[in-house]
Image (cartoon, rainbow, N blue to C red):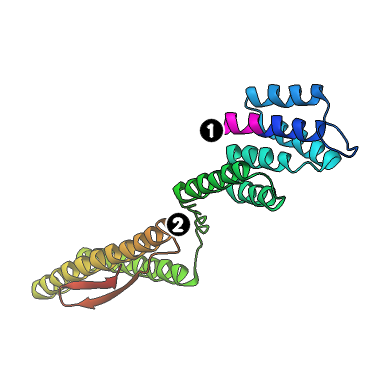
Amino acid sequence: MTRLALAVALVAATSHVAHADEPSPTTPQTDIARIRELYARGDYEGVRHELLLQYESSQDPALLFALGQVELNLGNYDAAIGYYEQFIASSPGDDQVALAQQAIGAARMKQKQQPDVVVEKPLPRRRWYVEDTGFVALGGAALLVGGGLLAYSYRLGSDRSGTLSDYDARVDFARTTRWTGIGVAAGGALVVGVALLRWRLRPDGGVTASAAITPNAAGFAVSGRW
């Protein structure tokens, strides 16, 4: 429909100018040939440019229909409907009004077929928050405490002074201290890991996480929310 309708509009434009009772600017045939050549190549932007120049010089309403067809091909459906309505307002013949109304219906149908535009919001840049620093500091402190307990347990186990019962007591205490130190150090490493993971998984605004280490008789307990 678009190619035929545009050709009809162009012919109507030249015919209107040629048969006007009063002198009016005419559309040179060379310009018409150029417009048709651009249209045949699919250069709708070029066609629109040429038609606008011709309309500025001739004010021929028939060119409004041609402009509507070009905008329809470019996917500018609101602009196309606007040109069609301007063409109808110029009081053309009934057959031309019917053709313009059909074109308006086609443009509105294409509008409804357009997919919804999905605007993707850019993800926020990954940020390091104060609580992340607190997690790392807590984990680092736990690592230091665990390392200190391990060193202390090693020193207790190496102390062979006193009686045999004293030595056995120190060995038992050193063993308990060693495992406590290992647990506290492991908990500290876990908290540091949580902080880094929390930061790493924050492209979509952040991942809420919290963690706490509580020493107990068995060593330590880790609680948190991820």
| First to last magenta residue range | 1-8
Instruction: Estimate the x, y position of residue 7 in percent, counting from the top left.
Output: 65, 29
Q: Main secondary structure of the magenta part?
A: helix
Residue drawn at x 19%, y 72% as measured from the top left: 219
Residue drawn at x 60%, y 45% as measured from the top left: 100
Would residue 159 be visible to someone looking at this image? no
Q: Which residue is mark 2?
A: 203
Instruction: Identify the mark at residue 1; answer none if there is no mark.
Output: 1
Residue 71, above or below 156? above
**Left or right placement of residue 157 versus residue 6 in this view:** left
Q: Quadrant of the rendered structure where residue 173 is?
A: bottom left
Residue drawn at x 66%, y 44% as measured from the top left: 93
- Residue 4 within the segment the image draws in magenta: yes
Residue 70, above or below 80? above
Q: Nearer the viewer, residue 132 or 207?
A: 207
Instruction: Identify the mark at residue 94; answer none if there is no mark.
Output: none
**Left or right placement of residue 10 versus residue 142 in this view:** right
Look at the numbered disc 1 and give the secondary structure of its residue: loop
State the CA–CA distance, disc 2 to disc 1.
Answer: 49 Å
Look at the numbered disc 2 and give the secondary structure of its residue: loop
Amino acid type at image mark 1: Met
Q: Nearer the viewer, residue 110 or 90?
A: 90
